[in-house]
């Protein structure tokens, strides 16, 4: 019998990773909201050790990074790589193994953290018994995703694939370095330096290259025009590859780490912000002449809102890594605002754009509640902007109170109005996510239609 031709993209795998991403996003959001309540003396689980604020906060951050972002990025890779290479992933069966293993890791991480087995590594609190599973999962993921790239018969390799291959090479090394070296072999200030590298390289060498790689794929396709400058895209890639790995020590400025390493991190951070400008210019050059797409295409609106957040984050970062700024903002809520703006305001917003484009495709249905998607956008954007402005102000107040050598309790009293606004902004963001989750559910359960019957602008055109 003639063999059945294998489907280029496994839409079921894409769909299940999107479902997992949405699920862990909800868990992360609820954890963040519960954590914020303690600042208003309203913590919902007082006296419950396994739901103590510190443990709930670690669930919030880990599920945001590894549950929400990683699952969505895997879905994006499963969709983009086969279209860029004209080859399916190495193995659908291995794809299902990776899906099951990765989300089992998420469950074990939640249970392990709440049970008190977290590591003392920021953004690497995954329990030590989970780390080997993560390493194995990353190796399997790299194999499954990189094989079609190497098998591709295309004459040239598009810049998205450059970013993806770089992330595949870096991520396992970064995770091993951050979760094993400080824990077992490199104590003290040297271990802190490695931890700083891990904190920043998780963002710069895992999340950033995959995120930008997917932007280079989705944006030109949805705008129906090529990227403005291929040369700028390569400048951005090599600039990030060269400068980003050296930034991590800026998390430990004015510490016992040698000053030459601290100065090097400051210079590298400012340099990468200059490189980022080329990336932003490239994408806004691509938008030129198609600006109406920001109004008419919600995915594009999410993408470009995230890019604006990225530009603001990097501009802010170029100033805040200087020793002068650090004397004021270190350990304050300024840092919390910065982290939310980059991890949620940039990569979270891009992921919502992926959902807008991919969810109707994998279910073969148009969006059932478009108005809820619009409400989701505005509630999330306004809530996040309010939170960032509020916590940035709180950080400045805290820093100057500490600098004045006033009693530490004075800074707590001064911060309480800001913390109330923080909770209100969090409730606004969660209201937006409730609209979003209902829109996902309503669309998934709606009547199936053929691709030809979907309205124009809702996942009707084949990509690639």
Image: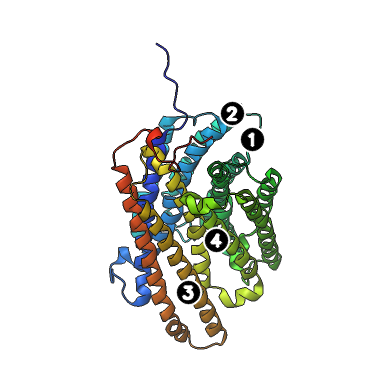
Residue drawn at the location 37% of the way across and 42% of the way down: 366
Mark 1, other Cα within 10 Å: few <14 / some 14–19 / many ≥20 = some
According to the image, label 2 marks what residue?
152
- 182 horizontally vs 278: left or right: left
Where, by quadrant of the figure, is residue 376 drawn?
Answer: bottom left
According to the image, label 3 marks what residue?
390
Secondary element under disc 2, as helix, strand or loop, is loop
User: Residue 122 at what x, y percent from top left?
Assistant: 49, 61
Q: Is residue 273 above or below residue 140?
A: below
Q: Which mark is residue 309?
A: 4
Q: CA distance from mark 1 to mark 4?
A: 29 Å
Mark 3, other Cα within 10 Å: few <14 / some 14–19 / many ≥20 = many
- Residue 112 in view here: no
Circles 2, 1 touching at the beta carbon (< 8 Å): yes
Q: CA distance from mark 3 to mark 1?
A: 44 Å
Query: Considering only order in the chain, which callout, 1 or 3, is on the residue closer to the N terminus?
Result: 1
Residue drawn at the location 40% of the way across and 49% of the way down: 21
Mark 2, other Cα within 10 Å: few <14 / some 14–19 / many ≥20 = some
Quadrant where the image shows the N terminus: top left
Secondary element under disc 1, as helix, strand or loop, is loop
Circles 3, 2 touching at the beta carbon (< 8 Å): no
User: Residue 108 at what x, y percent from top left?
Assistant: 36, 50
User: Residue 454 at what x, y percent from top left?
Assistant: 39, 38
The residue closer to the viewer here, 100 or 354, is 354
According to the image, label 1 marks what residue?
157
Secondary element under disc 4, as helix, strand or loop, is helix
The residue closer to the viewer here, 221 or 440, is 221
Circles 4, 2 touching at the beta carbon (< 8 Å): no
Circles 3, 1 touching at the beta carbon (< 8 Å): no
The residue closer to the viewer here, 438 or 99, is 438
Q: CA distance from mark 3 to mark 2?
A: 49 Å
């Amino acid at each position: 019998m003639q063999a059945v031709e294998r489907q280029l993209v496994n839409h079921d795998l894409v769909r299940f990773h999107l479902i997992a991403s949405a699920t862990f996003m909800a868990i992360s959001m609820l954890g963040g909201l519960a954590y914020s309540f303690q600042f208003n003396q309203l913590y919902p689980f007082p006296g419950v050790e396994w739901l103590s604020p510190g443990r709930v906060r670690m669930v919030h951050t880990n599920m945001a990074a590894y549950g929400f972002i990683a699952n969505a990025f895997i879905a994006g890779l499963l969709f983009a790589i086969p279209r860029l290479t004209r080859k399916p992933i190495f193995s659908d069966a291995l794809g299902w193994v990776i899906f099951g293993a990765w989300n089992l890791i998420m469950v074990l991480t939640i249970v392990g953290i709440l049970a008190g087995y977290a590591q003392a590594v920021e953004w690497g609190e995954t329990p030590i018994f989970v780390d080997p599973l993560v390493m194995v999962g990353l190796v399997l993921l790299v194999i499954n995703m990189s094989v079609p790239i190497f098998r591709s018969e295309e004459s040239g390799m598009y810049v998205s694939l450059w970013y993806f291959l770089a992330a595949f090479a870096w991520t396992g090394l970064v995770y091993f370095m951050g979760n094993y070296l400080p824990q077992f072999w490199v104590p003290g200030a040297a271990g802190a330096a490695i931890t700083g590298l891990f904190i920043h390289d998780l963002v710069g060498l895992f999340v950033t290259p995959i995120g930008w790689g997917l932007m280079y794929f989705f944006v030109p396709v949805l705008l129906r025009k090529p990227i403005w400058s291929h040369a700028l895209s390569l400048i951005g890639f090599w600039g990030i590859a060269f400068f980003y790995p050296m930034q991590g020590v800026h998390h430990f400025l004015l510490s016992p780490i040698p000053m030459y390493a601290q100065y090097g991190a400051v210079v590298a951070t400012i340099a990468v912000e200059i490189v980022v400008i080329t990336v932003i210019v490239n994408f806004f050059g691509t938008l030129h002449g198609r600006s109406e797409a920001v109004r008419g295409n919600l995915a594009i609106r999410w993408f470009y809102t995230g890019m604006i957040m990225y530009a603001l984050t990097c501009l802010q970062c170029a100033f805040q890594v200087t020793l002068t700024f650090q004397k004021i903002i270190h350990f304050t809520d300024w840092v919390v605002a910065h982290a939310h703006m980059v991890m949620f305001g940039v990569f979270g917003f891009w992921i919502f754009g992926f959902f807008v484009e991919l969810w109707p495709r994998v279910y073969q249905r148009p969006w059932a509640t478009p108005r809820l998607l619009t409400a989701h956008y505005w509630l999330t954007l306004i809530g996040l902007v309010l939170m960032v402005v509020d916590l940035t102000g709180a950080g400045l107040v805290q820093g100057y109170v500490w600098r004045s050598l006033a009693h530490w309790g004075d800074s707590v009293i001064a911060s309480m109005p800001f913390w109330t606004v923080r909770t209100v902004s969090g409730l606004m963001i969660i209201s937006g996510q409730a609209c979003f989750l209902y829109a996902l559910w309503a669309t998934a359960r709606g009547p199936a239609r053929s691709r030809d019957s979907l309205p124009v602008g809702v996942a009707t055109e084949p990509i690639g």
